Image (tube, grey):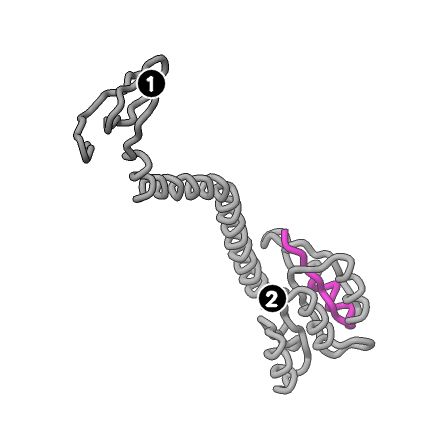
Amino acid sequence: MYKVMLVDDDYPVLEFLSEAIPWEKYGLQLVGRCENGAVALAQAERDMPDILITDIGMPKMDGIELIGSLKQRKPGLRVAILSCHSDFHYAQQALKLNVQDYVLKDTLDPASLEKPLQQFKESLDQEDRVRSHSHQLQDMVDRNKEPLKEKFIRKTMQRADSGPAGLAERSRVVRPEPRGQSLPSGPWLYRRIPAGQAAVRLRRHPAVCRL
């Protein structure tokens, strides 16, 4: 469940909203009812909410200052403002703080808050899905990192071994000294062959020996 904090210096409003809204229906939990911004900030430092519903005009710390402080700590905080003020100045300040909803107390009823609460819940769910998918992809990358590194090293070594130098090494003609045998003198050439097999004399030429 996502945590919700109510902040208003009008106690009857706090009481009304806390009892009238079916929080659990929307997958929400009411974790705080605070009478001003200072009390709300102190409580949020102990238990940060996911959703803040706050008045603007309050003693000690107003709603705008409270929103700014909590947004610094949790940029993804969802906020709905309750206010008796229809002044455009407050709306401008709220927009600067990326407030998602602005509700006038003059027309306040539980239904007017239920819609934004449902939208908050849906957007938070979407963020959780994206975060979970990102973690799954990162785990997959971490699990496959070492095998992929080993595979890359093996392929690199194979390419190096099959290059001109490796080919020259495998094709190099040598004149071995077979165990227990004495080779005849002269420019005889022998091909290197697998261990356990006798060396094969190829051809003798008085000046040049070639395969």
Q: Position of residue 87 (x, y in %)?
A: 64, 86
- Image quarter of residue 90: bottom right
Q: Quadrant of residue 196?
A: top left
**Mark 1 surroundings: few (<14), some (14-19) or many (≥20) residues within 10 A:** few
Quarter of the image that includes the C terminus: top left
Residue range highlighted in magenta:
1-17
Q: Nearer the viewer, residue 194 or 131?
A: 194
Is 58 placed above or below 159 here? below
Residue depicted at 79% across the width and 75% down the height: 61
Residue at position x 33%, y 37% in the image: 169
**Badge nearest the viewer, 1 or 2:** 1
Q: Which mark is residue 94?
A: none
Residue displayed at 77% across by 71% down: 37
- Where is mark 2, residue-wise? 113
Q: Is residue 10 magenta?
A: yes
Q: Is residue 15 magenta?
A: yes
Relative side of 105 to 127, left or right: right
Q: Amino acid at mark 1?
A: Pro
